[in-house]
Image (spheres, rainbow, N blue to C red):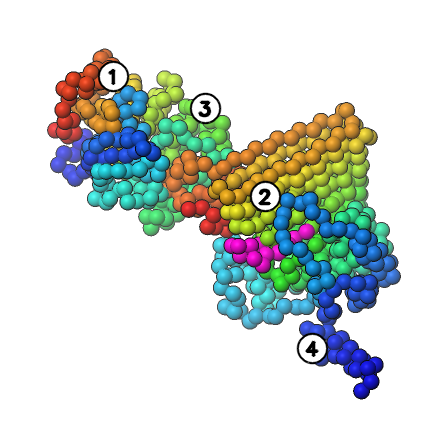
């Protein structure tokens, strides 16, 4: 599945970021190639969601050091909408409600904004609708649900399915899924994971952020990284997640405390 | 030359045949003579003159109101020219001659080319000439017995109708600005829908002949006879500049038994520059009287004017009558709006709905002021009010003054209010999906205003949506 030797799609080096005075990312390194699915696990407060937000361009965080190259460009220099146009998609942990704005209208506006920024032709309402309907099947979205306001009155599971629907329509190059499994029951989890798996492709990289191993039973990653204290402290394959589940995050904290981890392992062997 | 002779020659010069412009202007200031002069120039019947004079004399006893939550320099009422005859605007030969800024606005609003030409005063092809279109419609309306034209025409052609209904909803004693309007109003629209007739098209000033420059003191009267229906559109989304800073209009609606009037307004008068200089002061009195089982519905989108003072209201006089008020008021830069409605429940089983959406950006100040009054005899009256405010930025203000007076124990009155800000979370969510910040704000604002916009006739609603976005340009970032 991995295309070794290819150039990195995303290369993060020594990334540091703070919110106010508080430093959250403390020198993070990570490399993703097209076609790869990376999982990031870690205890609460380790900086997983901050990483997702910083990559998407949220300005509540200040980047204080390091660099991020995305397909050869300096990602940190781009405003959020340009990152979106360049193919970066963030599935939010807490999708935002926008009262009065139709879900499909929102999604069409998003798709056409991105197409326009790329110099592509915009889709008219009819063409868009058939795309959305097709993609809606991926996440078993009832048509009625498409006409409601963006995330307004949606259940937790509906919101997450809606995120995956947006991802399917926008077809990003790099998808970042921030705790997409939180608040999902087992059926919803299966649906969401099914949608994500359908989108795995040799051209696309995914960064799956999760607190629990459970999600990785459905979305099987190529690499697993463990974050603690604003850095990646352990990297490995699929088995690392299982080991982590058996031993708990205390194990990572222990290792970190003993100084046994040293520099994190190289990402791609 | 004797003094008398000089006076005569000067007068001749003043009112004579020399230039079109001077011909129909009268001196600045307001007096009984001016009121008489206006009435004479308009060739009005005696009852009109008397009505104007009563209004003028009453106006002298009134004080300009100070209760509205708006601030502006004192107006010198003697420094205003109260009458200038409607005259055709200078005709341009093509759109190329039109102010490029105006054209940009037209394009952004998506106004069709033909309409652009009409609005900008470009002479158009005979086929598309709005006047000829207007004439066609007028014929169709006349076949149904519908009267629709300028107020001045109506005074001459249907004096009995005018005399019967003029001031029946907004009496000449009503308030400072309405009284001033009653004394000096220049022109406006008049519509009468006969019994049982459903007006087949939206009546709009667009199709009214001689619609140019209706002036700063406009007066509109719409009478829907028993069981009839009419939808009326006022204003347009294109930015309108006017040399007159003070505007004081009056609109009266009469819905007789079982009739329905739907009155929609989009107001986009010049709001002034960023510092608020030069904008229009808009003091409007709008009120409808609803008889048995009739319905009056006001929908307004207010984005223009430096000052908006306006409370489209319903007197629910007949049993089972219904009043509705849907409003979006947007203030940006230094604009101030004090607007809302009054619902006066007199009849039994009367119902009213108020949906008000205030949007403030820049240094804009937005006030909702409403009164729901249930009189003793209004058994089972019901009202539902919802007042939502949306703030953009941290220098604007939203204010709500809902007054409720209930004198009947069977009444049900509900009031809901919310104030929200466009959150950073919402903006970031949109931007992460590729939508630029300005477009995101427009989208969120239109979502906020949707409940009201959907009450507008379709083609108006589309333009109004774009207008909201345009009016907010530069308010973020």
The Cα atoms of the two marked residues, 1 and 2, are separated by 53 Å
- The residue segment tinted magenta is B271-283
The Cα atoms of the two marked residues, 1 and 4, are separated by 92 Å
The answer to which of A228 and B192 lies nearer the viewer is A228
Instruction: Give the position of the N terminus of chain B as an image quadrant.
Output: bottom right
Q: Write down the residue under mark 4.
A: B19
The Cα atoms of the two marked residues, 3 and 1, are separated by 30 Å
Which sits earlier in the primary sequence, circle 3 or circle 1? 3
Q: What chain does badge 2 belong to?
A: B
Dots 4 and 3: beta carbons under 8 Å? no
Dot 3 falls on a residue whose secondary structure is loop
Residue B20 falls in which quadrant of the image? Answer: bottom right
Closer mark to the observer between disc 4 and disc 3: 4
Residue A93 falls in which quadrant of the image? Answer: top left
Dot 2 falls on a residue whose secondary structure is strand
Question: In the shown orientation, is residue A249 left or right of residue B413?
Answer: left
Q: Write down the residue under mark 3.
A: A155
The answer to whether marks 3 and 1 sit on the same chain is yes
Residue B55 is at least partly visible in this image: no
Task: Establish if B216 lies above or below A35.
Answer: below
Q: Write down the residue under mark 1.
A: A249
Residue B360 belongs to the span the image colors magenta: no
Question: In the shown orientation, is residue A21 left or right of residue B126?
Answer: left
- Residue A181: x %, y % from top left: 34, 23
Residue B7 is at least partly visible in this image: yes
Which sits earlier in the primary sequence, circle 2 or circle 4? 4
Q: What chain does badge 3 belong to?
A: A
- Residue B182: x %, y % from top left: 78, 55
The answer to whether marks 2 and 4 sit on the same chain is yes
Task: Establish if A115 lies above or below B318.
Answer: below
The Cα atoms of the two marked residues, 2 and 3, are separated by 35 Å
């Amino acid at each position: 599945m991995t295309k070794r030797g290819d150039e990195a799609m995303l290369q993060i080096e020594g990334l540091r970021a703070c919110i106010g005075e508080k430093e959250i990312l403390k020198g993070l390194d990570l490399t993703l190639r097209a076609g790869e699915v990376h999982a990031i696990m870690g205890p609460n407060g380790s900086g997983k969601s901050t990483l997702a937000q910083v990559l998407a361009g949220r300005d509540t965080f200040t980047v204080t050091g390091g660099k991020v190259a995305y397909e050869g460009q300096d990602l940190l220099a781009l405003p959020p909408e340009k990152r979106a146009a360049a193919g970066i998609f963030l599935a939010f942990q807490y999708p935002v409600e926008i009262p009065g704005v139709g879900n499909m209208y929102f999604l069409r506006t998003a798709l056409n904004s991105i197409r326009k920024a790329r110099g592509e032709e915009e889709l008219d309402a009819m063409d868009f609708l058939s795309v959305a309907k097709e993609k809606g099947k991926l996440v078993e979205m009832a048509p009625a649900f498409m006409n409601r306001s963006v995330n307004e009155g949606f259940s937790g599971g509906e919101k997450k399915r809606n995120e995956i629907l947006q991802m399917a329509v926008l077809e990003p190059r790099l998808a970042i899924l921030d705790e997409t499994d939180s608040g999902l029951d087992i059926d919803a989890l299966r649906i969401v994971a099914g949608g994500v798996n359908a989108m795995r492709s040799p051209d696309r990289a995914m960064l799956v952020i999760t607190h629990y191993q459970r999600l990785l039973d459905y979305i099987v990653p190529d690499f697993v990284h463990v974050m603690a204290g604003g850095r990646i402290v352990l990297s490995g394959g699929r088995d690392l997640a299982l080991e982590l589940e058996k031993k708990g995050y205390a194990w990572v904290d222990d290792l970190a405390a003993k100084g046994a981890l040293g520099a994190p392992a190289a990402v791609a062997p | 030359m004797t003094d008398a002779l000089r006076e005569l020659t000067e007068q001749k010069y003043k009112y004579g045949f020399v230039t079109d412009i001077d011909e129909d202007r009268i001196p600045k200031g307001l007096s009984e003579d001016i009121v008489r002069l206006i009435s004479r120039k308009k060739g009005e019947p005696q009852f009109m003159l008397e009505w104007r004079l009563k209004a003028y004399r009453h106006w002298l006893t009134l004080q300009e109101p100070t209760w509205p939550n708006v601030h502006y320099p004192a107006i010198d009422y003697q420094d205003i020219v109260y009458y200038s005859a409607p005259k055709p605007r200078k005709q341009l030969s093509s759109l190329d001659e039109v102010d490029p800024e105006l054209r940009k606005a037209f394009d952004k609003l998506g106004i069709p080319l033909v309409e652009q030409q009409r609005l900008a005063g470009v002479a158009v092809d005979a086929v598309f000439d709005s006047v000829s279109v207007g004439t066609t419609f007028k014929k169709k309306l006349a076949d149904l017995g519908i009267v629709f034209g300028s107020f001045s025409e109506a005074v001459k052609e249907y004096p009995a109708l005018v005399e019967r209904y003029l001031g029946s909803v907004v009496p000449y004693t009503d308030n400072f600005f309405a009284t001033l309007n009653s004394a000096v109003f220049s022109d406006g629209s008049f519509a009468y829908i006969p019994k049982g007739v459903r007006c087949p098209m939206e009546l709009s000033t667009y199709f009214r002949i001689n619609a140019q420059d209706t002036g700063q003191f406009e007066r509109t009267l719409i009478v829907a006879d028993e069981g009839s229906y009419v939808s009326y559109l006022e204003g347009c989304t294109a930015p309108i500049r006017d040399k007159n800073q003070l505007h004081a209009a009056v609109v009266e609606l009469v819905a007789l038994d079982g009739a329905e009037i739907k009155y929609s307004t989009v107001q986009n008068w010049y709001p002034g520059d960023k510092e608020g200089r030069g904008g229009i002061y808009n003091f409007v009195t709008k009120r409808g009287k609803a008889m048995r089982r009739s319905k009056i519905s006001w929908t307004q989108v207010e984005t223009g004017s430096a000052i908006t003072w306006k409370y489209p209201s319903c007197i629910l006089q007949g049993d089972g009558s219904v009043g509705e008020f849907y409003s979006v008021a947007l203030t940006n830069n230094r604009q101030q709006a004090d607007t809302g409605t009054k619902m006066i429940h007199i009849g039994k089983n009367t119902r009213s709905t108020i949906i008000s959406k205030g949007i403030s950006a820049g240094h804009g100040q937005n006030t909702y002021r409403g009164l729901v009054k249930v009189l003793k005899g209004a058994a089972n009256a019901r009202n539902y009010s919802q007042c939502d405010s949306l703030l953009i930025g941290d220098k604007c203000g939203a204010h709500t003054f809902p007054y409720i007076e209930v004198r009947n124990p069977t009444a049900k009155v509900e009031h809901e209010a919310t104030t929200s800000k466009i959150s950073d979370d919402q903006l970031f969510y949109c931007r992460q999906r590729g939508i630029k910040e300005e477009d995101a704000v427009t989208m969120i604002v239109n979502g906020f205003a949707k409940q009201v916009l959907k009450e507008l006739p379709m083609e108006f609603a589309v333009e109004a949506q774009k207008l909201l976005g345009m009016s907010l340009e530069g308010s973020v970032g």
